[in-house]
Structure formats: C-alpha cells, structure tokens
C-alpha cells in the first residue's frame, strides 16, 4: 500500500531503503521476518511511514508531519529524563541524611563503649 501510495515499484523501494533485492516478495509470501536493521533502514528512508502500522496494521499508514511526531517524542523523553533526575536527586538527599544519622549513632555508640571501658 505504501509503495502504491508513493508510486514505487518493489525494486525501487528495496534499492532506496538499502534492503536486499526480493526481500519484499519474501515478506509478502510469509517466508521471512522483518528485523530491526531492516526496520531502521525503512524508517530512515520513509520517515512518513508509521512503523506501528507497518508491523501491526494499527493506526494510520502515513504520519502527516514526521517532524512534529519526532518533537513530541523528544518532549516525552526530556520530561521522563527530568522526572528521573528529580527522583534520583531526592534519593541522594535521603541517603545523605541516612549517612549523617548513622554517623551520629556510631559516634554515640563509640562514646558509650569508651565510657563503659573506663568504668571497668
């Protein structure tokens, strides 16, 4: 469907994407599986092709503006990254407080041990 949409032959598509001659025919006949390298090549050559549609037949075949979709994905990644950094920073503060508390406990125990040794 995509090749028809783009008015391309299978041969032209395979050459443009850098995949083996006859690869699509093999896929069409159900005699092969698509690997991640091939998907990357297709995605690189056809950024408007929805990879989810290609693999699962879900959604629209064409991504109307691949630049906008990429920007949205980048925004999600940045948001997730920022949230993870905040969580890790709060964990660092928590662990630093625990270290200070443990150091105080150790100091108190050392004082208690030393005073009980002196008392003997």
Image (cartoon, rainbow, N blue to C red):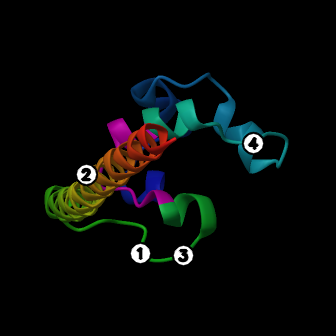
Q: Which contiguous range is marked in magenta? A: 42-51
Badge 3 crowding class, 10 Å Cα cut-off, few under 14, some 14 to 19, many 20 or more, is: few
Q: In terms of image quadrants, where is residue 57?
A: bottom right
Residue at which label 2 appears:
100
Secondary structure at numbered mark 2: helix
Q: Which residue does the image show at 38% across and 45% down from the upper left?
A: 115
Q: Which residue does the image show at 18% across and 57% down from the upper left?
A: 78
Q: How far apart are marks 2 and 1 (CA)?
A: 56 Å
Badge 2 crowding class, 10 Å Cα cut-off, few under 14, some 14 to 19, many 20 or more, is: few
Task: In this rendered view, identify the residue nearer to me: 78 or 32.
Answer: 78
If you read the primary sequence from the N terminus, does the residue marked by circle 3 or circle 2 appear first?
A: 3
Residue 71 at least partly seen: yes
Q: Distance between the residues labelled 2 and 4?
A: 56 Å
Badge 4 crowding class, 10 Å Cα cut-off, few under 14, some 14 to 19, many 20 or more, is: few
Q: Which of marks 3 and 2 is in front?
A: 2
Secondary structure at numbered mark 1: loop
If you read the primary sequence from the N terminus, does the residue marked by circle 4 or circle 3 appear first?
A: 4
Residue at which label 3 appears:
58
If you read the primary sequence from the N terminus, does the residue marked by circle 1 or circle 4 appear first?
A: 4
Q: Which residue does the image show at 51% across and 66% down from the upper left?
A: 53
Residue at which label 4 appears:
33
Q: In terms of image quadrants, where is residue 10?
A: top right
Where is residue 55 drawn, in percent x and y? 60, 59
Q: Distance between the residues labelled 3 and 2?
A: 54 Å
Taking the view exactly as shown, the residue that stands out farthest to the bottom is: 59
Secondary structure at numbered mark 3: loop
Q: Nearer the viewer, mark 2 or mark 4?
A: 2
Asked if the residue under mark 1 is in contact with the one under mark 2, i.e. CB atoms within 8 Å, the reply is no
Residue at which label 1 appears:
60
If you read the primary sequence from the N terminus, does the residue marked by circle 2 or circle 4 appear first?
A: 4
Secondary structure at numbered mark 4: loop
Q: Distance between the residues labelled 1 and 4?
A: 22 Å
């Amino acid at each position: 469907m995509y090749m028809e949409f783009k008015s391309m032959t299978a041969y032209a598509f395979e050459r443009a994407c850098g995949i083996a001659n006859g690869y699509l025919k093999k896929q069409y006949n159900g005699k092969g599986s698509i690997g991640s390298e091939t998907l990357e090549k297709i995605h690189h050559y056809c950024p408007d092709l929805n990879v989810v549609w290609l693999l699962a037949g879900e959604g629209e075949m064409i991504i109307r503006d691949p630049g906008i979709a990429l920007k949205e994905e980048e925004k999600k990644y940045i948001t997730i990254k920022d949230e993870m950094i905040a969580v890790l920073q709060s964990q660092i503060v928590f662990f630093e407080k625990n270290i200070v508390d443990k150091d105080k406990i150790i100091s108190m125990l050392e004082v208690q041990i030393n005073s009980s040794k002196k008392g003997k």
